[in-house]
Image: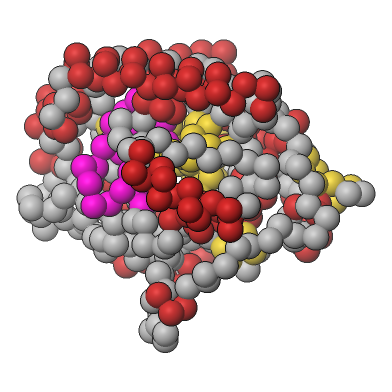
Amino acid sequence: MRLKLDLSVMDHYERHCPPPERRFNCLILPPPGYKIPIKWPKSRDEVWKANIPHTHLAHEKSYQNLIVVKGDKIVFPGGGTHFHYGADKYIASIANMLNFSNNVLNDDGNVRTVLDVGCGVASFGGYLLSSNIIAMSLAPNDVHQNQIQFALERGIPSYLGVLGTKRLPYPSRSFEFSHFSRCRIDWLQRDGILLLELDRVLRPGGYFAYSSPEAYAQDEEDLRIWREMSALAERMCWRIVAKRNQTIIWHKPLTNDCYMKREPGTQPPLCRSDDDPDAVWGVQMEACISPYSKYDHRVKGSALAPWPARLTTPLPTLANFGYSNDMFEKDVELWRRRVESYLNILGPNIQSDTIRNVMDMKANLGSFAAALFKNKDVWVMNVVLEDGPNTLKVVYDRGMIGTIHSCAEDLLLEMERVIRPSGFIIIHDKQVVIDYVKKYLVALH
């Protein structure tokens, strides 16, 4: 298979499914010396070096207080490219810039889902968790190797991906907050298409925190970039709500009013009326602004309850998928009972800290994850299949995260690949399916 890739637009970092003859039909062994991962929350700050033998990153970024090798462990002091003194202090400073109470970024539960673009080893997202905020930490497998592997080993929600040519696998208006910290992204390329993709996934009234030299440096090139980016954001109807030192925070409008007042011919244009902003699997990005629906425009925002109430509160989006409030509440109760049953069956195999990273491979409304939150200190990657109802929008509206995916690989082999040694797989299906699957489990150990 030979792909014609344009390296300048990062599509070599995007997902490209190999044909069947190029797929790995084998079991993937753990690295030599692999150890059972350190338990959460201790794993946020240290992991076993043997589990992720990519120590060159520690030497390359030692000056950033990001990652340090200490004996048989890799330690994460909590620093980053633009927060050498710790992600916790940086997060508090952003909350302070926005005048949020007690310098807590969750704004009394109104900020729940965050997209961290170019997240590195995901320290920003890791430190958000203590504020009841869950971040989708996004980074490619690039020159720094797979930093998402570090993030997952730490037990921090994260996803291998890139802003390239295709839409991110998340519905429109999924995140209350987006963050970018000096990750070498050219936001001005292709008529601002990457910034417009962020705009697509930000909720009405969402924030974009931008920490980069262009925001404060005084050399000619940085000033040029800043002028052009400021002009682009203004044409997108974003407005600056805070600026301090190295960080700028923009605010997305709550309604379509600003879009309607723009001069004819203003670029970027509004997307075509037949463009579905929630169609994401394999869909190319467009350099256009996705306007709000009539409902979103009328209610001036997402109309979501604060976290954690939104987890179990019936949502405005349910009707779009044929669910009544009563059907939603029954789904919540059904999965509460099922999760309780699962945990009883697993019994002594499951301690309070045994499980951290969980994937629901057919999430529907996300009620499995919602029930699990009430029992264990876990995070769940909710997977919604691309060939079914796009209920991932409901998952995000409930304050959880997930992704659209296509199960093109051999499913059991792919499950075995991503499951940690000593991990658990629960298959809930018809008896005929269970009997079929059992035939292959011996070979998978």
Percent from the top left, x then y, of residue 111? 43, 25
Q: Is residue 57 left or right of residue 233?
A: right
- The residue nearer to you, when weighing 300 against 93, is 300
Q: Is residue 352 left or right of residue 128?
A: right
Above or below residue 155? Residue 272 is: below
Q: Residue at x 36, y 25 (%)?
A: 367
Percent from the top left, x then y, of residue 252? 31, 36
- The residue nearer to you, when weighing 238 against 343, is 343
Is 176 one of the magenta-colored residues?
Answer: no
Percent from the top left, x then y, of residue 382? 41, 38
Q: How many marks on residues? A: 0
Q: Is residue 46 visible?
A: yes
Q: Residue at x 11, y 58 (%)?
A: 265
Above or below residue 397? Residue 36 is: below
- The residue nearer to you, when weighing 231 against 18, is 18
Above or below residue 178? Residue 142 is: below
Q: Quadrant of the N terminus?
A: bottom left
- The quarter of the picture where residue 434 lies is top left
Percent from the top left, x then y, of residue 35? 79, 46
Q: Is residue 307 visible?
A: no
Residue closest to the far bottom: 2
Is 391 one of the magenta-colored residues?
Answer: yes
Above or below residue 175? Residue 286 is: below
Q: Is residue 134 left or right of residue 419?
A: left
Q: Residue at x 53, y 40 (%)?
A: 425
- The quarter of the picture where residue 76 lies is top right
Region in magenta? 384-405
Q: Residue at x 48, y 17 (%)?
A: 340
